[in-house]
Amino acid sequence: MDKLKKQIEDMLSAFWDERALVGDTSQQGEVGIESVIVPLDSFSAVEILAELDAFLGVHTPDSVIKNGGYTTKEEFVNNLSDQVMCFLVSIDHE
């Protein structure tokens, strides 16, 4: 399961990197550090489910997406991968 979770985390990380808008915070005094200007909303996050469905071979429900979306990449990857793994465990025990 650890290998599967790592693969899911890698997919989520790549998804975030492709879709999050990033800006330079040097105007805020943090030279060279990037920050997310627009967090990934829950509607955009739902797009990853099609990729996860194809990878996992099961339909992943929208309920694994956090209402309101995600403000950081870490939150997105950690929260969503945990939710997907919980879902997989729940269907494995049915």
Image (tube, helix red, strand yellow):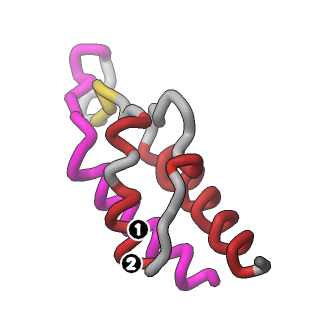
Label 2 environment density (alpha carbons within 10 Å; few <14, some 14–19, many ≥20): few
In the rendered view, does 18 fall on the left or right side of 44? left
Q: Residue drawn at (44%, 80%), measured in percent from left and top?
A: 57
Q: Nearer the viewer, residue 68 or 25?
A: 68
Q: Can residue 31 be found in the magenta stretch?
A: no
Q: Which mark is residue 63?
A: none
Amino acid type assigned to the residue bearing label 2 in the image? Phe
SS class of the residue under badge 2?
Answer: helix
**Residue at mark 1 to residue at mark 2: CA–CA distance:** 5 Å
Label 1 environment density (alpha carbons within 10 Å; few <14, some 14–19, many ≥20): some
Quadrant that contains the N terminus: bottom right
Q: Nearer the viewer, residue 67 or 77?
A: 67
Amino acid type assigned to the residue bearing label 1 in the image? Leu
Count the marks: 2
Q: Which residue is mark 1?
A: 52
Q: Where does the magenta region start and end?
A: 1-28
In the rendered view, does 88 fall on the left or right side of 76? right
Q: Residue drawn at (63%, 59%), measured in percent from left and top?
A: 82
Residue 76 in the image: x percent, y percent?
48, 47
SS class of the residue under badge 1?
Answer: helix
Q: Residue furthest right?
A: 93
Q: Which residue is mark 2?
A: 55
Q: Residue drawn at (69%, 64%), measured in percent from left and top?
A: 86
Residue 31 in the image: x percent, y percent?
26, 28
Quadrant that contains the C terminus: bottom right
